[in-house]
Amino acid sequence: MPPAPVRIAPSLLAADFSRLGEEVRAITAAGADWLHLDIMDGHFVPNISFGPLLVEKLRKHCPLPFDVHLMISPVDSYLEAFAKAGADLISLHPEAGPHLHRSLQTIRALGKKAGVVLNPATPISAVENVLDLTDLILVMSVNPGFGGQSFIDSQLTKIASLRRMIDASGRDIALQVDGGVTATTAPRCIAAGADVLVAGTAVFGAADYAAAISVLRG
């Protein structure tokens, strides 16, 4: 069978916050597959973004799957709030709570898909023993906390290793990359095995969202 098309998840963090409703409708019309929402607490990462209330308000403007990336610690006490706000998939970092396995169980018990996020220095072994509870693995190709950073090339090796791990498991696990994804780095991520790309300024900073998404998809 031919490989599934690469999915593009524009990151809301790069959108014009003065007209978020228009922005999410525009990327939907432009062919985006998911909407990526970065939740930052100013503690786990050195920035603050938004919380479940904004996710809930945006839900009425956007039919796309909501891909919620929690960069908050402790994370467990917020899982239900984001599930109720409209998240379809909730991803968290192994470092954001004491029991990754339990956190993933909680997300699934809430009826949502669960993801594990690996920072540049986090080894792939962090997810190895929870693949049965994992719907997505997100490789951070920058250090989390701010948009517009440069892609860290060493993460391509991690992406390739994770692709082999996922394929060997036989499980339906998406492999996502976030950070410095551009028309130049996207083909390298795809070649390494990624099948979901998060893009901030590469989409929201473009004059033509549809053209930008098409280029990233390859």
Image (cartoon, helix red, strand yellow):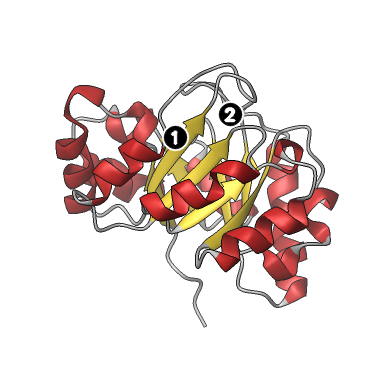
Q: Which residue is mark 1?
A: 182
SS at circle 2: loop
Residue corresponding to mark 2: 151
Name above or below for residue 120 compared with residue 78: above
- 64 lies left or right of 148: left
Q: Give the percent coordinates (x, y) of residue 65.
A: 36, 58
> Toward the viewer: 176 or 102?
102
The x, y position of residue 203, in whole percent, is: 32, 36
Do we see residue 217 in this rendering?
no
Q: x, y percentage for residue 212?
A: 29, 41
**Residue 148: percent from the left, percent from the top?**
46, 21
Q: Amino acid at mark 2?
A: Phe
Amino acid on which the number 1 mark rests in the picture = Thr
Q: At numbered mark 1, what does the secondary structure look like: helix, strand or loop?
A: loop
Task: Examine the rendered structure and indicate whether residue 96 appears above or below residue 103.
Answer: above
- Which sits earlier in the primary sequence, circle 1 or circle 2? 2
Q: Residues within 10 Å of mark 2 (few under 14, many from 20)?
A: some
Residue at 78%, 32% (x, y): give it: 121
Point 30% across, 52% down: residue: 32
Task: Give the tally of numbered discs.
Answer: 2
Q: Is residue 25 above or below residue 17?
A: below
